[in-house]
Structures are given as structure tokens and as C-alpha cells.
Amino acid sequence: MEAAAAAAERQDFLAYGQRLTSGEGGFFFFPIRHHSPACALHLARALAEIRPRAIVLEMPADFAPLLPLLSHPDIRLPIAIVSVADGEKTSDERLPVGYWPFSATSPEWAALRLAGEFGSAVILADRESGARLAAAREEKKGESGEDGEDEPRQDEPREDETGPALFTDEGQLAYSHYADGLVKRLGVRDFNEAWDRLFESRAAEKDWRGFFRDVGIHCALSRLATPAEEIAADDTLAREACMRAAMAKATALPGEGPIAVITGGFHTPVMIDPPSERPEQTKAQAGPGIQTKSYLIRYSHDHLDRINGYGAGMPSPRWYERLQQRIAEGHDDPFTEAATDVVLDLTQRLRRDRPNFTPPLPSLAATVGQAQALADLRGLQGPGRAEILDAARSCLMKGEDPRSGSPLMEALLAELTGEGIGEVPRGAGAPPLVEAVRRRARALGFRIEDGTERNRLLDIHRKPRHLAASRFLHVMTLLGTGFGRCLRGPDWAGGIATDVLFEEWTYRWSPAVESRLVALSIDGDTVERAADAILARRVQALGEEGQAKNAHAAIRLLMIAAQAGLARSCGALIAAIGPAVATDPDFGRVAVCLSMLDNLQRGRKALGFAGIPGPDELRLIAYRRAIDLLPDLETAKDEDVPRYVDALATLNEIAEVGAQAGEGEQPLDLDLLDEGVAALIDADLAPRAAGAVAAIGHMSGRVSAEALATRVIGPLQFSVGAPPARVEALAGLLAVQPALLKRTPALLERLDLVLAGFDEADFIEVLPSLRLAFTALAPDETDALAAVIAQAKGSDLDLAPRFSGGLTEAEMLANARLNASFAELMQADGLGSWLEEQAP
């Protein structure tokens, strides 16, 4: 009985599969997998035979106006349609909704090309992209609620709501219960390998009816194994209702011939056998959408492979392109030909990038041979992706642990994936901002013709073109495109390496860059206008997020804008920073702001603020506010004391340097600091704060050397408090004036006397705190202090600094002469071109 039932079930599925391509009711149903070359090739054969009068295609209906552009001869695949949503408020940025990619192996691309050739009408059958985005957001909100995760604040965007989506997602097909069982039954590693075994291996066959029959049965089984509640959990049912409505629309078209229905295989069963459903249920699922606009953009091989995981389409897109091309060319053994192409191209890649890993010719030949043998063993027509990978692991990896990664296998995977980037025709409707950015990038020497990641070294202080390139990279970062990443260079906000002449960047053009620019195109048609709009929104957001008085955040934004070349667009931001600093109640935070503004002032030429008085005025405001907050040292909480002492050190250092005004700036009044500190000399301060105040008081002449020694060394000498507390006053002095220990004999002698009087137990007890306190000294300060101590002790050890402060004039001239002689030798040897600056 069970055998008979199983046989009857098989016959039912076989009959179902044959119905798909029988022309039942005037319809031919083609279940596909996105980016499958086998589906694309068989679909092309089928459409050439049946010559449909109309094609119902699973794509968002609002993409229809872009269809004429897809026939443009200048298109180079891969490309994508990106759908961009309008913000809910006028201040919102428009964000990418999602992508619909086209590769050379896309069945949809084959259908659209042949539709133009045959004169077939094309009806896009899926829900509009805005409706799909809205449904996806609702689904994710529900998932978040079920997980019980904390809801983000209202002013924080949800990452899952704003992230890009992929409209060709095939998670229901690739990750179903049926797919899991199939992987186990076939003994393969994943669904992609199972799909290759069952279907891609048949790409060169001529029987398109048999192929789509089997694909249809496979997809029907996948759907049957998916619980009904899981299918109803998203907008699948509403989408399928739209697809059936499109089929009804196609039947009303004039003309003769059948109608081709091309959808993802998961949807095909309900296209040929519509379910009995309540109209109100479908209507409830088809909720309101979001207003969108759509554009053609360039896409890349690695995004075809990566975005949304392998459920988004086929892995290793360049491999499948090679395979499809060899089949289309009519080769007798296209699989082996394509595998040989991969191995030969891998060799070229290794010779170029990793010459030490280039395998010998016998190993390459063995790789192709073993891939063929594996295909024969597995009953395949020829080697596929899995066979190439397995053969390479066996023949090309020598002594490497595959679990820890292999440079050779990484290169092979890159070769299978590809590095190409498509091209859309000029005038294809891309927003002006996209073209403006492309022109700017090319003019500044950036290579954006492919998706390869590259490095760029920029001499930002001496070469105007390099400075312009740096500002372009920074403005692209401000725009949130992800185009470049700074590896090293001056950090103006932190005051680190500000004298460095070079910036090093890594950059890469990708679909994400292009779609982000499309999303921002409403803000302007140039980089500067879009950046100005972003800057204005950021300033507005500071107020909306309760940070209207957060001067630190505003100054950091000012730094970012300046590095992006927007200094002259920062008037509103500068105007907002002044009151925020002047009313900030936290001494430590004000000192940090002062430090950032001082860095900005010192780097005003590089940052584009030369001749603009705003930053210097802000520095004066921050300086005066820090002076006003000095009394807070007396009431500081214990946990705030170290931070406040660091702030006092910053204030003192900036005041000493700023007292001597440079060109184009106002001097800082050092007397203001001295008077503020004088009021604290006799105050009841924490030991660390007291040591810091005494040190500055000594520098201003208000505290004698003897009094300073008593205040700083006294707690250590007379064991006042616990061991760490005894060193606190000394730590405060070292934090603000580390040179005093070397320059003040009375202080150093007193410290030496106290330490010499300790027994071993006392010394060990305070040693950790002493070591921590002396970490405030820079290496050169430590060397200088050691030299003074050695001299005082009569030591003959040479503890003086090993390096001079700089080159003498004679040394510089000698080096210049040596450089000229070297250049002459290079010219004489015919190597003069090596000395010329290479174009970036």
C-alpha cells in the first residue's frame, strides 16, 4: 500500500511538472532561481520556441518606466535597479529601499532582451517596491517585539529598517525544510551544491520542458514543506495575489500566442493552481506602501555574491558567467572549458598578486583533471563550482591547514566571484549627483571602473591636488557612502599626529556607494550641496536629540566638515557652538572642547579656516569658560578629580602656548589663568588637585620652591594617608608641569631625601603608585630627568637623550648634495624615470 501510494504521489508530481510547460489555458509557467545560468539558458530556448505575446515577470510593478532603458546597447552587466524611499519628514534623508540586480546569468535579463526581440509585451507582476519595503519593516518590527528586545529611542533609527534590502531574496527556497533534507539526502555541503548537482549541471541540455518540469517539482516540494503560517507571516500572499492579477491583465491583451509567466520557483505552484482565499485576507496583508523613486545603478560581482547571503542568488557569479558563455558558444565540453579558464586566470592572478604561491604547470593540469574525475564520480556532465574547489584543495594546497585559511584558496574564491562592475548608459536617468561624484572622482585620480579595493597616499600639505583628493574622501565619508577609509593621517579632533604630512586611504567604488548617492540626490546636484544638506541636518539633529548644549559633539562635527572642505558652510554650526561652550557646566568637558578648538586653530590652513575668525573666537570663549569653572576643583567628586586635573593640565598647556599670538589669531590672557589658580592655592582640594594647583602657582611666582616641595613631597615624607594617597600630590604636579621635577633642585632633593630614608618595606609599599605617577612623563622627559639625577649622583653612565632635536644646517646641505649625486647616477644609468612622481 505504501509503495503504491508513493508511486501515485510521484505520478501526481510528474503530471504537475508537465502541466507547467504544456500551455494549459494559454499559459507557460517558468519557475526560476535568480541568477541561475541554467534557468536563463533554458528560458531563452523556451521563449524562442513559443514566441509569447506577453511575458508576466516577477518584478516590482513600479520598475516599468525603466524597462526601455534596459535595452540600451551601452549597458554592461552587472547593473541593478535601486528603489529609494522618500523620508516621512522633510528633514529626513531618503534611504535606499532595495536592489533588483541583473547579472549576465539572470533569467529576467534573458526574458527582457528576448521580449524586445519578439515584440512581446512585458507586465511586471510583483507588488510595488515601496509596498514591499513597508511589509518588510512591519515584519521586522514584529520579530523585534517577539524577541523582547528593548525598543530604541524615538530619535534613533532602526538599523533593520534603514538597511538596504534585496528584492530577489530566495530564503524560502534555499533555506526551507525541504532544502535541508535534500542537502542531507545528496550528501553535499549546502543548498548551492545541491542545486548545482540537480540543475546547473543540465545547463547545456536542450530539453527545456524537462528542465522546468523538474525545477517546478523541486520548488513545489519546497513550498509544501514550508508551514502555512510561515508563508503568511510576510507579504508573500499579497505579492502572489498581485502576480495573479497581472496574469489576468495579460489575457486581456490583443494578439495571438501564449503568455509566459516567469516567477521565482516558490511562487509558481499558486500561479498555476490559485488557492481559494478570502479577498479581505489578502487586502489586509497588502498594507500601505512607501513613496519611492527608482534608478539604474552600476552593480558589482562581489555584491551579487554577498548581499543578503547566498539566499540572494547564486554564489561565485563570475564562474557562472564563464560557464554560460562557454555553453552559448557551443563548446562540446563547456564545463571543462570553463574550469580550465578559471585555473588559467587563477595563475595570472597569483603571478600578479602572490608570486610565491603560483603553482607549477603539472599541478594546474592535475587540478583540471581531478575536477573532471570528480564530476564523473558524481554523475555530472562536467566539473562545477564544488568540483573546482575540491580539486584545488587537493592539488594546489601543499602543507596548509585549510581551517586557518589559505592565500591560494582566497585567490581562487576571488576568481570565482569576480571583480567586475557594470556600467549604465549616459542619460539613463541617474541623478546628477551620481554623475557629479563620478566626474570628481576620475578628475582626482580615483579608479572607479571596477570594484577593486585600492590604496591612495596623499601629500596633503604640499600638493594641492592631493589635498583636494583628501577633502573628496572626507566629504564622501560625511555623506555616508562608504567609499573610503582613512588608515592613517592627522587626527585634528584628538590632536594626534597633526604634523604628519601624509594621509593613507583605502577606497573602493561599490553599488552601496552609488545607491547612497541616489538616496541623497534630492539634496542637490553637486557634492558640496549634498554635503551642506547633510551638515544642516546634523546641526538640526543636535538639538532634536537633546544635545543642543553638547559643544563637544558640535565641535567634532565642525572638524569633520572642515576636513571635507566645508569650512565656509559652517556658519550656523559655529554660531551654535559659542553659546553651548559658554554655558557648559562641566570643567573637564570644556577643557576637551578647548583642546579641540585649539587644534582647529593650529590647523586652520589645512582645514580651510584661514581668514575665518569664527574658530579663534570660539577658542577664546572656551578658554574663558574654563577659567570660570576653575572653582569646581574645590567641590569635585573623588571620581572626577583625575579628569579635572587632566583638564587643568590641558588648560595650562594651551594658555602657555597661546599667550604668544601667532599670525591671524588673538593671544590668550595667561594672567586670567594665574589669577584663577591663585584663588585655589589655599583652598581645601583633593591631594592630586592640590599638587597640580601648587605646580602652576609656582610657575606664576605665587608658590616658592620650598613651599612647593612641602605641598607635594610632604604627604609622602610624613606618610599622610594610605600609600596611594601619599603620591597623589606628586602625581598632580607631574600631570601639569612634569619639567618642574627636573628644573627645581629643592623639589628633586627633597624627593631624593625622602626616598633614601625609606626602608625596603615602605619603598615597596609606595612603588606601584610612584610608577603610575611617573607615567605622566614622555620618553624624552624621562631621559632628561634621568640625566639630571645621574649628574647629581656623580654617575658616569651616559643617560643623556640619544637623539638630537634636529638636523644642523651643515647636515641638511650635505644630505642635499648626496641626494643630487644619487639623482645624477640614476640618470646616467637610464633610470631617471624612477625619480619622477607617478600619477596617482
Image (cartoon, rainbow, N blue to C red):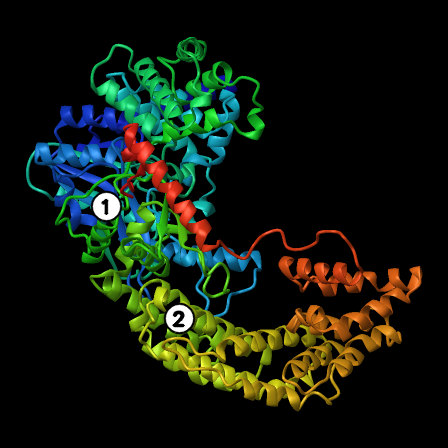
* Direction front: furthest residue: 810
Q: At numbered mark 2, what does the secondary structure look like: helix, strand or loop?
A: helix
Q: Residues within 10 Å of mark 1 (few under 14, many from 20)?
A: many
Residue 784 is situated, as x and y percent measured from the top left of the image, at 67, 61
Which residue appears at 15% of the width and 34% of the height? 113
Q: On the picture, is 174 further left or further right than 654? A: left
Q: Is residue 79 above or below residue 317?
A: below
Q: Is residue 592 above or below residue 335?
A: below
Q: Which residue is mark 1?
A: 125
- Is residue 258 visible from the viewing direction of this image? no
Q: On the picture, is 75 further left or further right than 146? A: left
Which residue appears at 29% of the width and 20% of the height? 203
Residue 408 is situated, as x and y percent measured from the top left of the image, at 46, 24
**Mark 2 residue type:** Leu
Mark 1 or mark 2: whose residue is earlier in sequence: 1
Q: Which residue is mark 2?
A: 558
Q: Nearer the viewer, residue 51 or 564?
A: 564
Q: Is residue 420 above or below residue 710?
A: above
Residue 252 is situated, as x and y percent measured from the top left of the image, at 12, 44
